[in-house]
């Protein structure tokens, strides 16, 4: 590191004004000097939505939360906090800090924290019990493949991050990591998996997210992010509430996330004709319905949870019927219809037709043209009902449509081109600016001496 400090001292000797910033950069020490043409930091861009669609407008802002409902009412947003495993002792930059790419991959560095004010979180609708934790900086490097491979053999989504939203917040699947084990709902995965929105929606904040320990994440409609992206959402600042806009739809939803398989996830509005960029924009209709006896489904309230739908049979590689020990609990007040994701049936298995009766396949995807992919792409869509309420399967189904080759990495071990860096905000020509960038804790306090 001595060579960097030496260069810093030389530059500071020639210029009185300087700026020092901290930024996570894969354990590399980089000096960017913008002074008398010594060195200019340039942003590289390529025509690839996987590189260009990340929401970085607010990436130079500190993440903030409302710790309690009282803080929310008073507008008391804080940049440091501690509750349970969610400890943020120093301020940290929100969202995506860095976007880089190689021939095969797009890499993001993210704190995992949204740039809108997050929280508060409670365990009950009356808001008398705080949720067990606050979120915290995850210091994540995540990569998305730049090309996709669709295989006949599908992969279950799994627990934990299955992709990332364009604001750097983790995408979790539609489950809450509990399943019916024949006696009670235990932690883990099984045949009857609990629906996260149905069972945990009360714990979501205004942005429709909460945390697993300290990892902030979405299971369903990322409505606050969609507001930031201009996706037909209005915001009531006085009450910190987001809702679908009552105005007429005018444009296709933006990309809100990227799944591990390299496919985009759009907001809920797409072209009515999947092959026509000029067709009317409307809400995409999920291919799933609850098993309540309508549309040709079984009525689980009558039959009991003695079978799983065909999509689950395919996903779990089940042959034949369930054994008695694999039955789910009876539908009752403690286990209402919709409690488990297997309480939902896919209309394509019930004689209905995609493109006529509904829009999205069992993976919550379709092949269509979009503003970013005018020649067409496979894409997932956020699903909501006609009232704006999240609709199963919410973001993607319980299996990926393409091969999920992306995921978290500890380091970037190949040559990459930087498309965006939160600290590279100095002008390209300046008569007195030096930016020192190094790997450390975001939001920390540092000093440079001559």
Image (cartoon, rainbow, N blue to C red):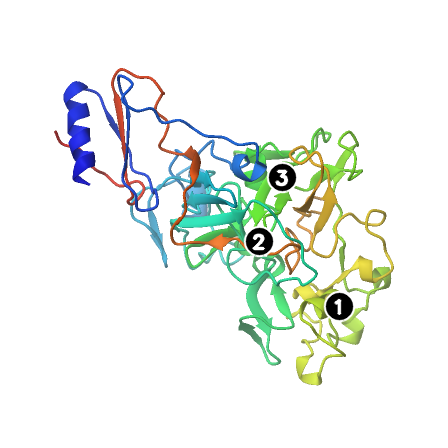
User: Would you name the residue on which mark 3 appears?
Assistant: 243
Provide the secondary structure element on which disc 3 rests. strand
Q: Nearer the viewer, mark 3 or mark 2?
A: 2
| Residues packed near mark 1 inside 10 Å, few (<14), some (14 to 19) or many (20 plus) | some
What distance separates the C-alpha of mark 1 from that of mark 3?
32 Å
Query: Is residue 314 rendered to the left or right of residue 171?
Result: right
Q: Is residue 392 visible?
A: yes
Which of the marked residues, 2 or 1, is nearer the chain's N terminus? Answer: 2
Q: Position of residue 329 (x, y in %)?
A: 67, 76
Provide the secondary structure element on which disc 2 rests. loop
Provide the secondary structure element on which disc 1 rests. loop
Query: Is residue 180 rendered to the left or right of residue 429?
Result: right
Q: Of 66 and 397, which appears nearest the observer?
A: 397
Which residue is painted at 59% across and 78% down in the image? 181
- Residue 215 is drawn in which quadrant? bottom left
Which of the marked residues, 3 or 2, is nearer the chain's N terminus? Answer: 2
The mark found on residue 219 in the picture is: 2
What distance separates the C-alpha of mark 3 from that of mark 2?
17 Å
> Are the residues at dot 1 and dot 3 in contact (C-beta closer than 8 Å)?
no
């Amino acid at each position: 590191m001595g060579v960097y400090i030496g260069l810093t001292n030389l530059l500071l000797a020639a210029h009185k004004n300087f700026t020092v910033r901290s930024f996570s950069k894969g354990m590399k020490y980089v000096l960017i000097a913008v002074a008398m043409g010594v060195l200019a930091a340039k942003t590289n861009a390529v025509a690839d939505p996987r590189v260009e669609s990340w929401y970085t407008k607010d990436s130079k802002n500190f993440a903030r939360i409302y710790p309690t409902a009282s803080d929310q009412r008073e507008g008391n947003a804080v940049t440091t906090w501690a509750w349970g495993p969610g400890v943020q002792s120093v301020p940290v930059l929100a969202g995506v800090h860095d976007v880089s790419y190689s021939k095969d991959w797009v890499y993001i560095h993210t704190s995992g924290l949204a740039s809108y004010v997050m929280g508060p979180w409670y365990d009950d609708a009356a808001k008398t019990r705080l949720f067990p934790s606050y979120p915290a900086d995850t210091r994540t490097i995540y990569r998305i493949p730049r090309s996709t491979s669709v295989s006949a053999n599908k992969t279950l989504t799994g627990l934990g991050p299955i992709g990332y939203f364009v604001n750097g917040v983790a995408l979790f699947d539609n489950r809450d990591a509990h399943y019916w084990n024949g006696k009670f709902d235990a932690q883990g995965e099984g045949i009857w998996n609990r629906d996260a929105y149905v069972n945990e929606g009360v714990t979501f904040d205004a942005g429709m997210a909460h945390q697993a320990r300290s990892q902030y994440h979405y299971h369903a409609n990322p409505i606050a992010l969609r507001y930031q992206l201009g996706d037909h959402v209005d915001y009531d600042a006085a009450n910190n509430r987001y809702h679908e806009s009552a105005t007429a739809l005018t444009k296709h939803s933006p990309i809100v996330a990227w799944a591990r398989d390299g496919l985009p996830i759009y907001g809920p509005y797409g072209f009515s004709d999947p092959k026509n960029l000029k067709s009317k924009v409307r809400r995409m209709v999920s291919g799933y319905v609850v098993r309540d006896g309508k549309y040709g489904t079984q009525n689980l309230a009558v039959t009991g949870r003695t079978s799983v739908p065909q999509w689950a049979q395919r996903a779990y590689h089940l042959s034949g019927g369930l054994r008695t020990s694999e039955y789910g609990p009876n539908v009752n007040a403690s286990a209402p219809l919709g409690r488990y994701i297997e309480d939902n049936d896919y209309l394509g298995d019930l004689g209905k037709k995609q493109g006529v009766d509904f829009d999205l396949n069992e993976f919550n995807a379709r092949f269509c043209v979009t503003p970013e992919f005018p020649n067409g792409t496979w894409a997932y869509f956020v699903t909501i009902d006609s009232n704006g309420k999240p609709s199963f399967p919410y973001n993607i189904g319980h299996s990926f449509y393409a091969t999920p080759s992306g995921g978290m990495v500890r380091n970037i071990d190949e040559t990459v081109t930087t498309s965006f860096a939160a600290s590279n905000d100095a002008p390209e020509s300046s008569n007195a600016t030096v930016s020192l960038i190094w790997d450390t804790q975001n939001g920390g306090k540092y000093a440079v001496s001559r």
